[in-house]
Amino acid sequence: MTALLAGSITALVLAGGRATRMGGVDKGLQLLNGTPLALHAIQRLQIAPNPLLAACAINANRHLASYAQWGFDVWPDTVPDQPGPLAGMLTGLRHSKTSHLLTVPCDAPCFPPDLVARLAVAFEQPGVDIAVASARDEAGILRRQPVFALMQVKLADRLEAYIQGGGRKVGHWMSEQQVLEVAFNRPDDDPAAFVNLNTLDSLRSLAAHSDTLSP
């Protein structure tokens, strides 16, 4: 039985980046089989309903009305200059009305549908600030997937201080917290579940192999 209570998690889809490697488009609004990537991420979270999940929201800094039409809260960065995914995380921590925040990027549409449940188990152990997914790379080595993270909302002040001090790296900030890695390396886990789409070509390639998106 998990230590977290029903309704204790807000899920935030991170779609507030500049997407420079994708030509500067608004990545969260790019279509995958007719569905914008950010909305696809929310739908992915809803494949396996979980009582721990209270709400879903989107972190975006452009085209806010387009995101809002889906009926979910849209939260722009609370700090200026779009300093990366940490800004989105801080935004979620500041806005969330639950005790924990889950973050997922909009550009990794194959993430495991049971992500919430498996990360939540980490909080059965005392002292955990953040549970973060890890998966095997092409060489078979487990690597952290730091933007797939479930964290305590009370970390907001620590994160804001880190950003205000010039910090921008998710991994470095997490190294200062009590982090527990959750390995997604079961035999039935998709080894490409956490691969992200950096280019429009990679998006088109995934769309051409839509069976990859099966849960």
Image (cartoon, grey):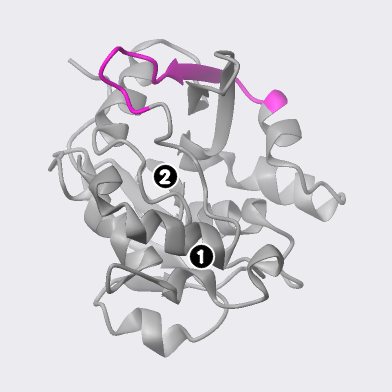
The verdict on residue 183 being magenta is yes
From the top left corner, tell me how far across and down residue 182 is, in percent: 43, 18
Secondary structure mostly seen in magenta is: loop
Answer above or below: position of 57 versus 211. Answer: below
| Amino acid type of the residue tagged 1 in the rendering | Ala
Q: Residue at x 24, y 33 (%)?
A: 114
The disc at residue 197 is none
* Viewer-side residue, 138 vs 176: 138
| Amino acid type of the residue tagged 2 in the rendering | Leu
* Viewer-side residue, 29 vs 155: 29
SS at badge 1: loop
- Where, by quadrant of the figure, is residue 81 drawn? bottom right
The residue under label 1 is 15
SS at badge 2: strand
Label 2 environment density (alpha carbons within 10 Å; few <14, some 14–19, many ≥20): many
From the top left corner, tell me how far across and down residue 29 is, in percent: 43, 76
Tell me which label, 2 or 1, sits earlier in the chain.
Answer: 1
From the top left corner, tell me how far across and down residue 181 is, in percent: 50, 18
Q: Residue at x 27, y 47 (%)?
A: 213
Q: Residue at x 32, y 52 (%)?
A: 209
The disc at residue 101 is 2
Label 1 environment density (alpha carbons within 10 Å; few <14, some 14–19, many ≥20): many
**Mark 2 → mark 1, Cα distance in angstroms:** 16 Å
| Quadrant in which the C terminus is drawn | top left
Q: Which residues are magenta?
A: 175-190
The verdict on residue 75 being magenta is no
- Where, by quadrant of the figure, is residue 23 drawn? bottom right
* Viewer-side residue, 97 vs 64: 64
